[in-house]
Amino acid sequence: MMAEDLTPRQQMILELVVREFVQTGAPVASRTLVEKYGLDVSPATVRNEMARLEELGYLTHPHTSAGRQPTNEGYRYFVERLLRETELPLAERRTIAHQFQQVRDDIEEWMPLAASVLARTARGAALVTAPQAAQPRYRHMQLISTQGRLVLLVLVLQGGMVRQQMLTLPEPLPQGVLSEAADRLNQLCAGLTADEIEPRIGSLPLLEADVARLVVGMMRRASAVAPDEIYHDGLSELFQEPEFQEGPHAQGVLRVIEERSFLEAILAHALGSTVGSVRVMIGGEGRFDELRACSLILSRYGVAGLATGALGVLGPTRMGYGRAISAVRFVAGVLSELVYDVFVVRTESALPYRTEYEARDTESETRTTE
């Protein structure tokens, strides 16, 4: 029997078993369902349907208990077919949005706040990675005469990142000459990556070629910056769950939280580069054995092609999926709006050289073109 062939009664019983087991952690008996939920069928009928669901792999019969509990396949069917779309209560959404509004200008505060909010709201261990820029693309550049042969090169990349360098010319040049050279490079390089700019350098006049080489180096250094830290919260509470009292299961959780390469493998498998969708990963899906006792609810946030990060909630397979999914979806949406504001809106309205970016994200070096 395929999943689509479950009868309405079987779907109802599977849903009730999942909800009851998530709430109590104890195997669910047929009589409990009839009495607690007022079913208009006998315990014997429910017991027969539960036996059929066990044959299909959606329930299991642990030890000699009279009750049953969901398998990973049962949870998966529940999430994919029976779980109704919900949102967090309006008051919670307003509170969360207000908290992020307080730190909207401080990117470094986004991730720890997101981890804290997710852990508290979803009642699980939360993990968040910082937004990482895609391969930088050239947006705009200025050459500003400062003193004698010293020139300030200000480079603005698509997405709002600003870099600056001091360079020393062989001889002083008037600002008009510098501005004309910058204008020509802006026309030539707009929207290109470092790898696309480099082959064009050989055909440029000497000054512009030297500046273009510096620009390529600045862009490559910018692309090499990739935050490795995984922000997390709620781990101690998670380890209080009975599923993680055993060493192997707890070690699997620690690998997700502490090993960036392991998390990246999970994200690549579960999310790819898509922004906005929520993915539920149950029991490691046969690929990550360390997670066989875990469920992960994941989403990628940000602006595709500019900067994206990932966030998620990790818990036992016996978790409150509806609330956790709603929390992940909402926080991912809030973070995406913040990324859009910083990497798109502010860039569009910004002058080529902005003090707020200079203070936060600028490198200063002295180079010579001699």
Image (cartoon, rainbow, N blue to C red):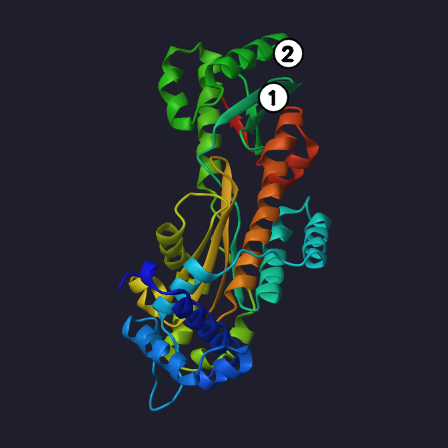
- Rate crowding at label 1 as few (under 14), some (14 to 19) or many (20 or more) other CA atoms within 10 Å: many
Disc nearer the start of the sequence (2/1):
1
Of residue 93 and residue 175, the one placed in the foreground of this image is 93
User: Is residue 159 depicted above or below 240 in this figure?
Assistant: above
Q: Specify whether 163 is left or right of 67.
A: right
Residue 259, image x, y percentages: 41, 61
User: Is residue 43 depicted above or below 341 in this figure?
Assistant: below
Of residue 119 and residue 197, the one placed in the foreground of this image is 119
- Local SS, label 2: helix
Q: Which mark is residue 175?
A: 2
Residue type indicated by callout 1 = Leu
- Rate crowding at label 2 as few (under 14), some (14 to 19) or many (20 or more) other CA atoms within 10 Å: some
- Local SS, label 1: strand
Image quadrant where one finds the N terminus: bottom left
Residue 318 seen from this side: no
Q: Specify whether 10 is left or right of 239.
A: left
Residue 23, image x, y percentages: 53, 77
Of residue 177 and residue 173, the one placed in the foreground of this image is 177
| Residue depicted at x 41% and y 69% | 9
Q: Residue furthest bottom?
A: 64
Q: Which mark is residue 150?
A: 1
